[in-house]
């Protein structure tokens, strides 16, 4: 789900303030866990997981892209690395940690703990992230071919 929604969220949110988009994506992640914890059926759990996929996919697609707008030019590479590392570490650590909590205290408790962490992250975004108006919209036709972006010819197959 995340792989499918990542480009769609990026395109659909093209004209929206990135702060609002990131907060909405964090809200999807928190809502996913809040919905999953008491899930009375597989249908509710599946809906919760869809919300998670939208939130995580969108965050992966947009998270590192805002780094350049949050720090001075000389710190952009470091900020982008930190954001990407944080997203990656959160993804890698959350799975075994959730499994451990689920094993020790039950799967519902694992979702409650995840919801708590997601709500803390949501609050941090809401309190600390400045307004980030869009700088340009991305459309389905941008770019039409992977090789439309200038690069060494050897990296482009088939040629344009």
Image (cartoon, rainbow, N blue to C red):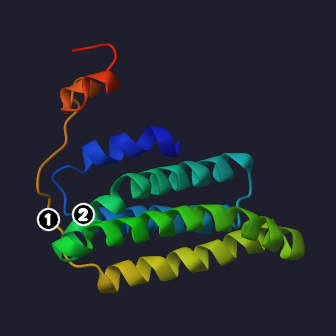
In the drawing, does residue 129 fall left or right of residue 134? right
- Tell me which label, 1 or 2, sits earlier in the chain: 2
> Label 2, on which residue?
18
Q: Are marks 1 and 2 in contact (CB under 8 Å)?
A: yes
| Residue 75 drawn above or below residue 43 | below
Residue 159: image location, x then y, percent: 26, 14
Compared across the picture, whether 154 is left or right of 81 comes to left
How packed mark 1 is, by other alpha carbons closer than 10 Å (few <14, some 14-19, many 20 or more), is some
Q: Quadrant of residue 146?
A: top left
Query: In the shown orientation, is residue 15 left or right of residue 84?
Result: left
* Residue at the extreme left: 135
Q: Can you give x and y, in whole percent of width and height, for residue 86 in the image?
A: 49, 70
| Direction from residue 128 to residue 118 in the image, left or right | right
Q: Residue furthest right?
A: 104
Q: Which residue is mark 1?
A: 133
Q: If the image is split into quadrants, where does the C terminus sit?
A: top left
Callout 2 environment at 10 Å: few (<14), some (14 to 19), or many (20+)? many
For residue 57, the mark is none
SS label for mark 1? loop
Q: Is residue 70 above or below residue 17?
A: below
Residue 54 vertical placement versus 18 (above, below): above
Q: Which residue lies at the image location 44% right of the left edge and 63% below the top edge?
A: 84
Whole-number angstrom distance, CA of label 1 to CA of label 2: 6 Å
x and y, in percent, of residue 7 in the image: 35, 41
When asked about the image quadrant of residue 79, the answer is bottom left
């Amino acid at each position: 789900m995340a792989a499918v929604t990542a480009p769609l969220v990026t395109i659909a949110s093209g004209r929206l303030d990135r702060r609002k988009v990131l907060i909405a994506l964090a809200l999807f992640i928190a809502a996913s866990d809040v919905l999953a914890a008491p899930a009375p059926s597989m249908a509710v759990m599946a809906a919760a997981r869809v919300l998670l996929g939208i939130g995580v996919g969108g965050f992966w697609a947009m998270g590192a892209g805002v780094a350049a707008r949050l720090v001075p030019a000389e710190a952009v590479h470091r900020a982008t690395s930190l954001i990407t590392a944080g997203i990656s570490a959160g993804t890698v650590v959350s799975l075994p940690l959730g499994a451990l909590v689920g094993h020790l205290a039950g799967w519902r408790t694992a979702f409650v703990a995840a919801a708590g962490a997601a709500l803390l992250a949501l609050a941090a975004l809401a309190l600390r992230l400045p307004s980030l108006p869009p700088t340009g919209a991305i459309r389905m036709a941008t770019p039409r071919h992977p090789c439309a972006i200038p690069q060494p010819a050897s990296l482009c197959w088939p040629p344009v």
